[in-house]
Image (cartoon, rainbow, N blue to C red):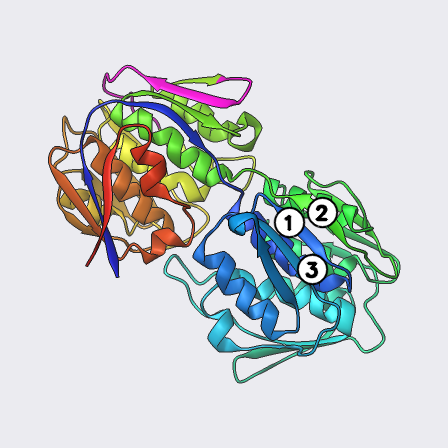
Amino acid sequence: MDKIIVTGNGPLKGEIAISGAKNTCLKLMTAALLSDEPLTLTNVPRLSDIGTLSELLESLGCEVALLNGGNVMVLSAGEITNRKAEYEMVRKLRASFNVLGPLVAREGEATVSLPGGCAIGARKVDLHLMALEKLGATITLDEGYVHCSAPNGLTGAVIEFPFVTVGGTENAITAATLAKGTTVIKNAAREPDTVDLCKCLSAMGAKISGAGTSEITIEGVDRLHGATHEVIADRIELGTFMIAPAIAGGEVELIGGRRDLVDAFCNKLEATGVVVTETARGLKVSHNGDRLKPVDVETEPFPGFPTDLQAQMMAALCLADGTSKLHETIFENRFMHAPELIRMGAKIDVQGGHATVTGVQKMNGAPVMATDLRASVSLILAGLAAEGETTVGRVYHLDRGYERIEQKLGGVGALIKRVPE
């Protein structure tokens, strides 16, 4: 098991290329199960989560080939040879549950393990199942597995979610592409990941309208064909690397970044005194090194402030000149990075889903432990501005969602290295 060592080294300068979106790519990969023709994805991030889902898809009969150093993926599900997604695979990656919709839509039957708990909260799948039942599937639960059956095919329906669910919306969309008739999804997720999935499905022959709004309409078709699709830039990686010059000072250009992917986040970052400029190649972020201004943050579904950037924003606000309040509304247990930041000298008070951060003049390097993906990167960001050396353990969390982070941050002047435990 590796650890990452970060030493505060002053302002950053240079450029960082933003990788393809992990969460988007995972859902695009499951869409390959809907067609017996190949789906080619470009701008694929080289991450452990991508490999985990590849193994699951291969267990179902899908062939997966990586080209161009892993940046291009070809998935071919010519024949589904297995309709059961085993617990040992699904437990490693929650997004694996999204094979359920495509499998039952194409095969009329699927058995998928419940994903179980998660370090940042329970993240239930009841809305996924409600959506599939609306489409006519019969669902039973047995020994931790969901058995979903629709031997005569799925039928279009009106699906109204009581609250926004990204995974549930995406499972419903993929299932509805092959359903008979029209499906209308109300209170649908508006995330860029969901929009990109709809674009890919449309390229495969699906008839989808309303992507990016709260109401999505799908006209079912008899079959989908192969396609080539480029994965969008990862908005969470983008926001993460925007925090780097905000916390350490300097100027960094994020190649491939788009403001529309992280507009609510940009607004909060600019409120702290950081300058965000759109360029011909992406986004440029600059900060003169003065103490940041405090801001209050509340996480919300897109287009609100992303829960996946809350930990990184907290790291920056630890050094702000004043008190900031953060309200986490999406997941419980998502302040587990706070005790580790406190080890570095931060002043944070957590009460349930609320955190009060009182900025300090400086933070000090310390040995800290990653508790989840976004928490791990928040500790690295804090280390960029801390005095001395910060050692982040359990960085396997980090490898699930950040491609070559040492090289990317090292390329703009950070002192960062990976070493064996």
Q: Is residue 265 magenta?
A: no
Q: Is residue 165 visible?
A: no
In the displayed structure image, the side of residue 133 where residue 279 appears, left or right: left
Q: Earlier in the sequence, mark 3 or mark 1?
A: 3
Q: Which comes sooner in the sequence, label 3 or label 2?
A: 3
Task: State the separation of the CA atoms marked 3 and 2.
Answer: 11 Å
Q: Amino acid at mark 3?
A: Ala
Q: Are marks 2 and 1 in contact (CB under 8 Å)?
A: yes
Horizontal and vertical percent for residue 196?
Answer: 66, 43
Residue labelled with disc 1 = 41
Q: Secondary structure at mark 3?
A: helix
Q: Earlier in the sequence, mark 2 or mark 1?
A: 1
Q: Which image quarter holds the C terminus?
A: bottom left
Which kind of residue does numbered mark 2 sit on? Thr
User: Whole-Å distance between the Cαs marked 3 and 1?
Assistant: 10 Å
Q: Which mark is residue 228?
A: 2
Residue 4: mark in rendering = none
> Residue drawn at (64%, 66%), measured in percent from left and top?
63
Task: Quote the CA–CA distance across marks 2 and 1.
Answer: 6 Å
Q: Which residues are magenta?
A: 278-295
